[in-house]
Amino acid sequence: MELLHLKYFKRVAENLNYTKTANELKVSQPALSMMIKKLEQELNVELFYKKGRNVFLTDNGSILLKSANNIFNELNKAEELIYRNEQTKNKTISFTASHSRLISYIFDEYIKHNPQYMFNCEIDTMGAIIQKMINYDIQFALSSIPINHPKIECQPVIDEDIVITYPKQFDNSPNFDFIYNNDIIKNFVFPSHNQDYNNLTKSKLITMNMNIHNSTYVDDAFITSIVKQRKNFAFVPVSMCRKFELPYISNSDLIIHTSIYLSSLKNEKLNEVNLDMFKFIESYLKKNKAFYVINRNS
């Protein structure tokens, strides 16, 4: 049964007049009568009967009209829901970051000036970010590790320095000799979910022939609080050290020079609201790029 035939039947049943209905639908009366006839043949029942010049619904016609009304009411509801869903999507910014620190300050600033938008935002692993992007679950991503995928365009926005912060007990060691002393127990704290970041920092320690005696893995939600206690060593961005006034080792051999990246699907344009935030993040990072690196002249 075609919806068009059902629609025409519904109009005839409401008007009980073929001529009037044909004019409303802008079809010929013979064509309209033929569609009703096909519907009757398909259902193997009569839907209308004539008495003189008047047209009336049969019992089966009344049953079908009731069902047709329910069907079109549900379709109208579905159309409204689809419209609202599309409107919501057009006002929703969907993105992911590989680490909360990359977006926290920027996000606060952005939503302060854009209360009209809704957000679908997550902190996720690099593998999950790639999968969500190619599945169109998110429109763009912010990460401290480059994304290498044929469908994704990944561009560095600014440079970033990652440094080692250390426990309070070493505050009076200006030469940082303790970091190379293997007799000193070094307990390093790492983000529990960010394997790519951990591999980057651990490879630096291996390069410097530096031993880690203990490794503690802490979720993003808690790692800042743990690091601020200053009971452990940790590789953290210099921007975090500045934000929370944490001391760090300024030895150039122990600094990891990397970048912060913005990524989106190749050959796919961001919608208006996502493009707005994408550009805001890019502008914010470039404007504050000195905050993310150590002054090379200091």
Image (cartoon, grey):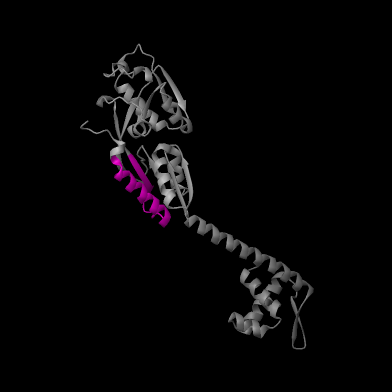
Of 191 and 11, which appears nearest the observer?
191
The N terminus lies in quadrant: bottom right
103 to the left or right of 6: left
User: Magenta span has 118?
Assistant: no
Q: Residue 275 in magenta? A: yes
Q: Which residue lies furthest to the left in this view?
A: 297
| 11 displayed left or right of 54 | left
Q: Residue 156: x and y, percent?
A: 31, 42
Q: Mark yes or no: residue 265 visible.
A: no
Using the image, determine if residue 135 lies above or below residue 99: below
Looking at the image, which residue is at 47% across and 28% down? Answer: 218
Q: What percent of the width, then of the height, locates residue 67?
A: 71, 67
Q: Residue 297, position in %: x, y?
A: 20, 32
Q: Residue at x 71, y 74 (%)?
A: 40
Residue 178 visible in image? yes
Identify the image quadrant of the C terminus: top left
Left or right? Give the position of 244 relative to 36.
Answer: left
Segment tinted magenta in the rendering: 260-289
Q: How many dots with numbers?
A: 0
Q: Residue at x 69, y 80 (%)?
A: 15
Question: Seen from this angle, which residue lies furthest top?
Answer: 183
Pick the front one: 171 or 232: 171
Residue sitting farthest toward the bottom = 52
| 174 left or right, relative to 31 | left
Up/down of 290 relative to 23, above or below? above
Residue at the spot 64% in from the left edge and 75% down from the top edge: 8
Q: Position of residue 235 (x, y in %)?
A: 36, 27
- The answer to which image quadrant residue 41 occupies is bottom right
